[in-house]
Image (tube, rainbow, N blue to C red):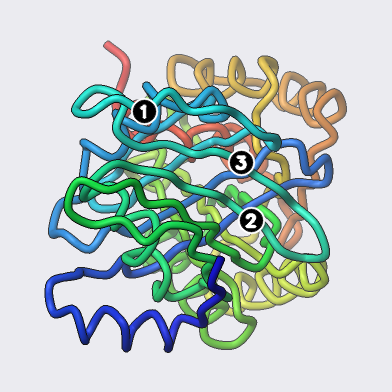
Amino acid sequence: MVSLSPEEVRRKCSEKGWVTMYERIATLTDEDRERVLLIEDHPTPVGAEWVVRNYEATSPLVEKAWREGKRHFFLLRVGEASLDLEPSVRAAGVESVEVRDGEVRVTHAGLAGAGVGAALSRGCAEGVSRVEIHEEGGGSRLGRATVVTPELRRLVIGVDDTDTEEEGATWSAVDVICRRLEDEAGVFYSRHVTVQLYPKTPHRTRNCAAVVVELGVPTKRVERVKREFLRMLKEVSFSDHTCAAFWDRLEFPRELRDLGNAAKRRIVSREEVDEVVEICEIEVVSIGDGERGRIGAVAALPFIDDHGLAARVPR
């Protein structure tokens, strides 16, 4: 085994001249540390659906795999698994996932080009601490490597009611905040989803849309990032009814998903939302004197994992 820094891998790839490099890799956990959300930005313009499908077919540690543009998502179970690699149909996958000492260690294995992706292409991505190369791969050979990244805590934030008839835009204001947090607090800004809610509710500016974002936060900075988010939200909000809802787990309970779906189809009562907030232990914070944004902020949360459904208006 050879342990290399991203700079050392970059030099090695430059010498070879034919190896393309992943752009960014991040690993998000929650307090249970039983699963890891692995997020990878593939180097090609749209991303490799091939990688997603092979990983899903090959490794029992992959509970769910999908692609959003060039960004791959893998919900991984912590543990080890034996891979029955087969060219073309099960050519690459995850052998092991470990979380310890503030780091996440994901061991990839792949045949031929997939092995190069495992051992070299991932090793110099932004967000990688180091890569431990067990077998380099290339040609028709097997490649195996452990990619080590800092453990980040998943933080999902729903926001609603920041604008008025005269000024503001919730989707844009929240995007500005998240980009500032990337620069100032070292967070990973993973996803931003606009959620279409029930369009006939009387309490809306025009489109009746909330926003939900996903951040990867260094584990010791979670409370600080929440405070900074709320401070910045207050700066860019024009409404007295702005609310933010915080969620820090990898999965959403049925009650919360049901509430989100209901809020797209009908007017949801404050009592319904409060019941779900209590059952699911959701942290909700108001910015201003009112709480009209509470419903949208909470209902938006589960749609971070389904931006296609998030944008639809049920017919």
* Dot 2 and dot 1 residues touching (CB under 8 Å): no
Q: Nearer the viewer, mark 1 or mark 3?
A: 1
- At x 51% / y 29%, what residue is drawn? 62
Residue that numbered label 3 is attached to:
96
Give above or below for 10 relative to 275: below
User: In the rendered structure, which amino acid carries the disc numbered 3?
Assistant: Ser
Residue sitting nearer the eye, 87 or 313: 87
User: In the rendered structure, which amino acid carries the disc numbered 2?
Assistant: Arg
* Dot 2 and dot 3 residues touching (CB under 8 Å): yes
Give above or below for 190 relative to 228: above
Label at residue 105:
2
Q: CA distance from mark 2 to mark 3?
A: 8 Å
State the SS at label 1.
Answer: loop
Residue 59 horizontal side relative to residue 186, left or right: left
Give above or below for 280 relative to 39: above
Residue sitting nearer the eye, 295 or 182: 182
Which of the 4 quarters of the picture holds residue 105?
bottom right
Label at residue 313:
none
Q: Position of residue 118 (x, y in %)?
A: 38, 54
Q: Position of residue 299 (x, y in %)?
A: 58, 32
Residue that numbered label 1 is attached to:
85
